[in-house]
Image (cartoon, rainbow, N blue to C red):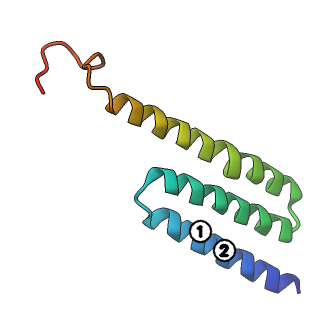
Amino acid sequence: MTDVLIVVALLLVAGAATTAVLNRDPVRQALVLSFLGLALALLFTFLQAPDVALSQLAVGSAVTPLMILLTVRKVRRRSGNDHGADEPAGRER
C-alpha cells in the first residue's frame, strides 16, 4: 500500500513540475509551485521524513509562492507607472 502512495505522490510531483515549467504566466506558476510544494510534502511524509515534509510545507508551498506573487505585483505596479518617475533623466520614450 505504501508503494502505491509513493508512486501516486511521484506522479503528482512530476505533473506539477511539468505544469510549472510549461506555464508562461508568473502568477499561475506561483500557484502551481504551491501545489508542487504540497505534493512534495506528501511524498516526504510517505517516505517517512516528517521533518523534511514540514519544512517543505512551510517554505515550498507557502513562503516561496508568496514571495513570487509579491514580487510580480511590485514589478507590474512599477511597469504600469506612466509618470516616468522611475526612468533616468534624458531617456526618451
Q: Residue at x 39, y 36 (%)?
A: 76
Q: Residue at x 64, y 62 (%)?
A: 36
Q: Residue at x 77, y 61 (%)?
A: 41
In whole angstroms, how far apart are the C-alphas of marks 1 and 2? Answer: 6 Å
Q: Secondary structure at mark 1?
A: helix
Quadrant of residue 22 in the image?
Answer: bottom left
Residue wearing tag 2: 12
Task: Where is residue 56? Give x, y as percent.
Answer: 74, 53
Residue wearing tag 1: 16
Check contact, mark 1 vs mark 2: CB within 8 A.
yes
Q: Is residue 4 above or below residue 23?
A: below
State the residue in front, 10 or 69.
69
Q: Identify which amino acid the numbered label 1 is placed on.
A: Ala
State the residue in front, 85 or 14.
85
Residue 2 as seen in the image, left or right of residue 11: right
State the residue in front, 14 or 49.
14
Task: Where is residue 80? Give x, y as percent.
Answer: 33, 32
